[in-house]
Every structure is written in C-alpha cells, then in structure tokens.
Amino acid sequence: MADATAAEPVKLKVFISYVRKDEDFVQDLLAGLELAGFEPYLDKHDIAVDEDWEARPARLIEAADTVVFVISPDAVASERCAWEVERTIDLKKRLLPIVCRRVEEAQLPPRLKQLNYIFFDHTNFGASLEVLADALRTDIWVRKHPRIGEVALRWEARERVERHVGAIIATAARENAARAAQEKRDRAAPRNSRRALAWSAGLTALLAFGVVAWWHQDTLKEPYWQIMARH
C-alpha cells in the first residue's frame, strides 16, 4: 500500500517567453505542458503604466527551471523577448527555443542560433509537445542548476550590502579620526597660548634689561672708586 503521506514529486517550472500575437499557440502549449506534468507559467504582459516592466519577468525567469522561448518573426523582433533571452542566459538558466512560426536564419539573434530548436507542427501538435516534454525531462541537473543561480544571486546581493556597509564604516572611521585630531588640537591650543605668552614676557623682560643696560653703559664703564667718591 502506497504511503498516503508521501510528498508529491516536485514539478519542473517552465517559464514561456512569447509575444502576444502568438498567444493562441501559447495557451495550447501551456495546457499541454500542464497535462504532461510540468508547472508552466507566463507573463500576461498586463503591466501597469507606472510598473517597472523588467521587474516581473525577471522574477519569473529566476524562479524557472527552464525557459521556453517561442520563436516567431514577431518574437525575434521584440526587444522585450530579446531582453528575456539575455536575462535567461545571464542567470545561466536552461533555454529551450521552439519554433511556432518559421523565421529566416539571418533574422535569428546570435544567442538563439547556438541552440537546437524544436519545430512545432500544427498538424501534429501532440508529437511536437512530446518531443518538448522529453527535452524538458532530460538531464536531471536542471532541477538543481537554477537553484545554484538563485544562491549566486543572493551571494551577489549580500556582497553588495557588505561593500556598502564597509564603505559607511570606513567613512565613519575617517570622520571620527578627524574629529579626534581636531579635539586634540583644540585642547593643545590653550597650553600653546600660555607657553607663547611666557616666551613673549621673557623676551620682553630681556629686551627691557638690554635697553636699561645700554642707557647706563657710561656709568657701568666708570671705575668703582670714582662712583663711590661721588657719594
């Protein structure tokens, strides 16, 4: 008897990148992948005017095990789809391109030319879907590899925070050192002033003595007995 408490197998998450013109095809693809046991999802493109359009698809791509890119003339001409492809590759996610509508080889982005495509035959959609499902299940590492990308993103975010905090601490340390040096100079200023005043008084007295001595130099030159005789 099977264990009723056993956890259900984790479904592979599949993000579908497409253009709105191919939405009918994509809805059939979405339903087919769900029936095949995957967890497919897509961006409905219903983003508010004031919303950052890159933020939401970025989160959807980060959460995916595999990104399926639906190739069509409109898709390869879309800047948004091109951004999603680049984001997928930057995050080192698995990218599977499928051909919904044929495109000339010269029109394909260089990133997609390096990959193998799955061609969807509209007269035999089920067979093409089966090929895609097999490709999605191939290489069990796809369950773990995206998680590595997510961990890398968290590490990068933490490093950015640590660098920012380190810069703040260094700035605060420099400011504290400058403040301490200024306080030391301020405390030393009265002592320096008193020392300068003492030196000034001594120099003044020495100069006064010199003037007096110069004034009475003739008297100082007289013999002692002459001075005493006058008295």
Image: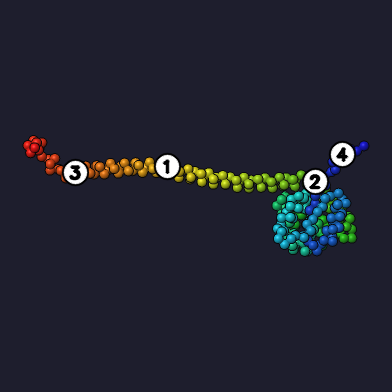
- Dot 4 or dot 2: first in sequence order is 4
Q: Is residue 35 left or right of residue 200?
A: right
Identify the element where label 4 is drawn. loop
- Residue 219: percent from left, percent from top: 12, 41
Neighbor class of circle 2 (other Cα within 10 Å; few <14, some 14-19, many 20+) is few
Q: Quadrant of the C terminus?
A: top left
Disc 3 vs disc 4: which is toward the camera?
A: 3
Neighbor class of circle 1 (other Cα within 10 Å; few <14, some 14-19, many 20+) is few
- Dot 1 or dot 3: first in sequence order is 1
Separation of marks 3 and 2 at Cα, in angstroms: 108 Å
Residue annotated with mark 4: 5
- Residue 35: percent from left, percent from top: 88, 51
- Dot 4 or dot 1: first in sequence order is 4
Question: Are discs 1 and 3 less than 8 Å apart at CB?
Answer: no
Residue 180 seen in the current view: yes
Residue annotated with mark 1: 187
Q: Quadrant of the N terminus?
A: top right
Residue type at the position of mark 1:
Arg
The residue sitting at 84% across, 60% down in the picture is 25
Question: Are discs 3 and 2 less than 8 Å apart at CB?
Answer: no
The residue sitting at 71% across, 45% down in the picture is 151
Disc 1 vs disc 2: which is toward the camera?
A: 1
* Label number found at residue 139: 2
* Label number found at residue 212: 3
- Dot 1 or dot 2: first in sequence order is 2
* Label number found at residue 90: none
Residue 111 seen in the current view: no
Above-or-below relation of 122 to 91: below
Residue 207 placement: quadrant = top left
The residue sitting at 49% across, 43% down in the picture is 177
Q: Nearer the viewer, residue 107 or 150?
A: 150
